[in-house]
Image (spheres, grey):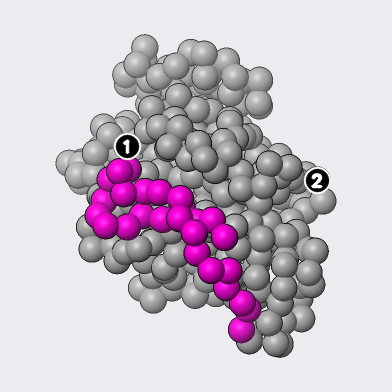
Amino acid sequence: MRALVLDGGFGFQNLNIAERERPEPGPGEVLVRIAAVSLNYRDLLLVEGSYNPRQTMPVVPTSDGAGIVEAVGPGVTRFSPGDRVVNGIAEGWIDGAPSAGGLKTIRGGPGGDGFCADYVLVPERALFAVPDHLSLTEAATLPCAGITAWCAVVEHGNVRPGGTVVVEGTGGVALFAMQFARIAGARTMVLSSSNEKLDRISDLGADVTANYVEVPEWSRAVRENFDADGADLVVELGGAATLENAMRSVKPGGTVALIGNLSGSHAPLNLPLAVMRQVRLQGITCGSLGDMARMMAAVATHRLKPWVHETFPLDRYRDAFELMRAGGHVGKIVIALDPDA
């Protein structure tokens, strides 16, 4: 079978398609014929060496995969050959508060090989049925970006009808956050440096948009468009350059969901601002299998459709990663191992 393997060191010169033996399922395991995987920024960092400089190799990147059950091992009762499934990202994080051990079970990195291979073994507990209204390409976008946005908005953001949510960016997490905020009954404001992207985001349902290059102090735009005190939640994807604006954008007692670090990993913290406004800074790293189950139920109930920017065949994996690096996408980037996915 084919697998995309990083071996011999970091860098794209060491990322290649290799042949491997097809695995066989053991007790409690499911063999999935992977149809599609989606890329996340962590995959780019993994290949370049900045995600985990001590990453063991060889390793198959990508944490998100959807496909068809090929075979099941002894004791598997929830799935049968032919079922459409998608994985939960942290196989050892069952529910509740995170643990160091649970976070180390994220595939395509600390938890071992990821999903960019024709066949992958997955524990039964870490698989979920794909809702009928989604293609496998769309379903493959859910495990990392979807669950991260769900936890930011619902599990930790506690967004309610009539609430207000600010989302930085137009990538996968950002669009999912906007969609989850909308189905929770909140108003949304999306930020980008591209007016072209903002036009597309408006068409996809954003209530308000703002160009953060044209409006550098965008916290003012938040208060002008929402409550004068600010928003209930900011989904913080920018990192060092955007953190203070995010903190100034939330109302007293509001939440800043810390997810991305695109503009840098180390930021000065305005302690008086955080203390006097009682800002809650909540780090978000994906979510548990319980979070995934709740998200999948919401996706099915509301028939939520992920936005896929572009799909690449496996032999064009370098083009997919280059698009991720360039940042010109709106929504998710997918690699299809099955051309009919």
User: Dividing the image into 4 quarters, which one contains the N terminus?
Assistant: bottom right
Residue at (57%, 73%) from the top-left corner? 23
User: Dividing the image into 4 quarters, which one contains the C terminus?
Assistant: top right
Residue 46 position in % (x across, y down): 33, 51
Q: Earlier in the sequence, mark 2 or mark 1?
A: 2
* Mark 2 and mark 1: Cα distance apart in space: 33 Å
Q: Nearer the viewer, residue 58 or 1?
A: 1
Q: Which residue is mark 2?
A: 133
Q: Which mark is residue 262?
A: 1
Q: Nearer the viewer, residue 89 or 318?
A: 318
Q: Does residue 131 appear left or right of residue 289 in this picture? A: right
Vertical comparison of 219 with 85: above or below:
above
Residue 219 position in % (x across, y down): 37, 26
Q: Is residue 282 magenta?
A: no
Numbered range of the magenta stretch: 1-26
Residue at (61%, 48%) from the top-left corner? 337
Around disc 2, counting alpha carbons within 10 Å, would you say few (fewer than 14), some (14 to 19), or many (20 or more)?
few
Element at label 1: loop
Q: Nearer the viewer, residue 50 or 222?
A: 50
Which residue type does callout 2 highlight?
Answer: His
Residue 324 visible, this angle: no
Residue 117, by quadrant, is bottom right
Residue 247 position in % (x across, y down): 33, 38
